[in-house]
Image (cartoon, rainbow, N blue to C red):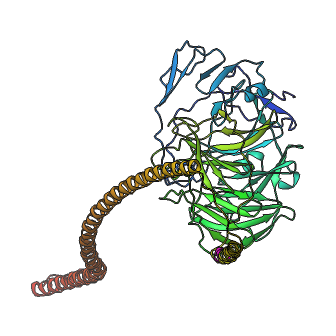
Amino acid sequence: MSTGTEVPVSPLGVAVPTKFLDPSSFMVWSANALLSFDISPEVRRSGNRSNGGPSGGRFSGGPRHRSIYKPPPPPPPGSGSLLEPRRRIGFGDREFSDNCSESRYFMGTEETRKDMDIDSWCLDLSYDQWVPLPVSGQRPSARYKHAAAVVDDKLYIIGGSRNGRYLSDVQAFDFKSLTWSSVRLKMEPQIGNWSPENLLSTSGHTTITWGNKLLLIGGHSKHDSDSMPVRFIDLESLQCGIVETSGKAPAARGGHSASLVGSKLIVFGGEDKKRRLLNDVHILELETMSWELLEATQTTPAPRFDHTAAVHGDRYLVVFGGCSHSIFFCDLHVLDLQTKEWSQPEIPGDMISPRAGHAAVTIGESWYVVGGGDNKSGCSETLMLNMPKLVWSTLTTVKERDPLASEGLSVCSALIAGEIYLVAFGGYNGKYQNEIFFMRPKPRNSSRPKIFQSPAAAAAAASVTAAYALAKSEKLDFFETEEPIKLVVNKKDVSVELDAVREDKKVMELSLTEARQENSRLREKIEEVNNTHAELSKELLSVQGQLASERSRCFKLEAQIAELQKVLESFHSIESEVEVLRKQKSALEQDMEHAAAATRQGSGGLLSWLSGAPRSS
């Protein structure tokens, strides 16, 4: 592989964007590059969309309804150097020791043998157990709510969110060389002023492989449009762009599911850019790139996002989990794509805890569900749904703070050494993750696809079955009257069956006891919620009373202000009257002065005449 153009690295190990790089080349992460680590991961689900998603977490990067984990304190000064001798490195409930000879973890990077053979390593794995994959060189930035896909021998990671920011990079992990590289893309000429960074800066999106392209469906970004965008990445030409679609496109959203059935892409649920929850179903015909709305009947699932969905038998869309802004779901719904009817079958097997932000992938007739969480903690168990039988089982469980007990992680399937493996990456569990984990699923026998009937179809089928059983019974009775059949009862077989029944009874009694205990816990929680509700109601009444008194005061103040305004308005007329009076006073004073002057002149002439004084000329 070409090493491409060397890209400068910042002191925290983050690649610095450069322009005009050869789009056909990759940036290979340097093995001795400085380490990047989280300094202040945010608490998710803060309620704003500054993140990289409607915060996406349950974070400040997405809509936010929950905060599964509290962010850990930043590392102490001087603890981030790979050159310092350290015996143990701790994070939350996890500790990594540096005394391992083959793989050592240092704050997100690993030292590993370069001569490791991935095929032999995978074949040595135990079944149904998660194992971290030793990686050479530096890893990409840790993230969650990204999109992931495996094509040929590479795992592609697109976008995501970290520390409240949308990520726009495309990273590729080579399963052969065990190294990460950054994929440099160029825009399709018709796009105009768009750049790959603006186009791919998104989180909460989904991706599928279609031909030689990766199609990116929806997601939240700073450039949200009214309708759901469909972007593409051509893995051959390394071009990216926007796919032009026809028909009525669904509203822009993130946290939805997108499932491929032949050439049709089934989109369900999600959360739009106004934080409204959705439960509609849209179909994108990939041959013509045209949208249509599927009008389904029966009991539609509650609106939700951050759920998962899969297709069974090319006919049934299976939806599991997810959440609203306050409720986490563990229900399972099935949509018959032929009859367009929803149903909610009863699922036997292990009890499943509610979760959202989990990841899922289908291998054969088994649906694997990994991670997720609720308002309290992450989900540590890896589940498997037997889709023909609709039975849940727990494959394995990790520690509470394990990277796999995260939300917003991704899981894909990869064919290595002739076997299919599960590949998990990223997520957030109080710390952003960038490790790769492998699981070798145990081979399971396949069975015929199960048909999930609507209530009417199920009733009709039951009637036919009952009629057939009655006819068969009558036919058997007829032959018994002709020639009685001697039945030989084996006491040993009966004893074995009785023992099996007793064991089943014990299991059922244990399950019943657990169910009763769970009901008791739920009653206590309900009582606690009711008490809290009562207290909040009292506080609400008190606040409403205070608000009413404040409103009364406001009304009185408004009345006083209105009176004062009237008084102020009357001041203008008073000032005008005062001015008129001043003018009248001035005129009167002038008249009085003139009169006094005239009087003085008149009295002076009379005295002169009386005294006989000569009049001055």
> For this view, does 134 lie left or right of residue 495?
right
The answer, for residue 404, to whether it is visible in the render is: yes
Quadrant of image for the C terminus: bottom left
**With respect to residue 178, does 190 lie above or below?**
below
- Residue plotted at (60% across, 36% down): 433
Magenta segment boundaries in residue numbering: 458-462
Position in image of residue 202 (x %, y %): 67, 50
Position in image of residue 383 (x %, y %): 60, 46
> For this view, does 615 lie left or right of residue 234?
left
- Residue plotted at (72% across, 21% down): 31
- Residue plotted at (18% across, 86% down): 602
Position in image of residue 332 (x %, y %): 59, 60
**With respect to residue 466, does 371 lie above or below?**
above
Res. 82 image quadrant: top right
> For this view, does 552 lie left or right of residue 508?
left
> For this view, does 274 lie left or right of residue 340?
left
Q: Nearer the viewer, residue 318 or 76?
A: 318
Label the magenta part by its dominant secondary structure. helix
Position in image of residue 222 (x %, y %): 65, 53
Q: Nearer the viewer, residue 68 or 337?
A: 337
How many marks on residues? 0
Query: Does 461 lie within the magenta span?
Result: yes
Spot the residue most to the top: 85
**With respect to residue 582, does 183 lie above or below?**
above
Quadrant of image for the N terminus: top right
Q: Nearer the viewer, residue 600 or 88?
A: 88
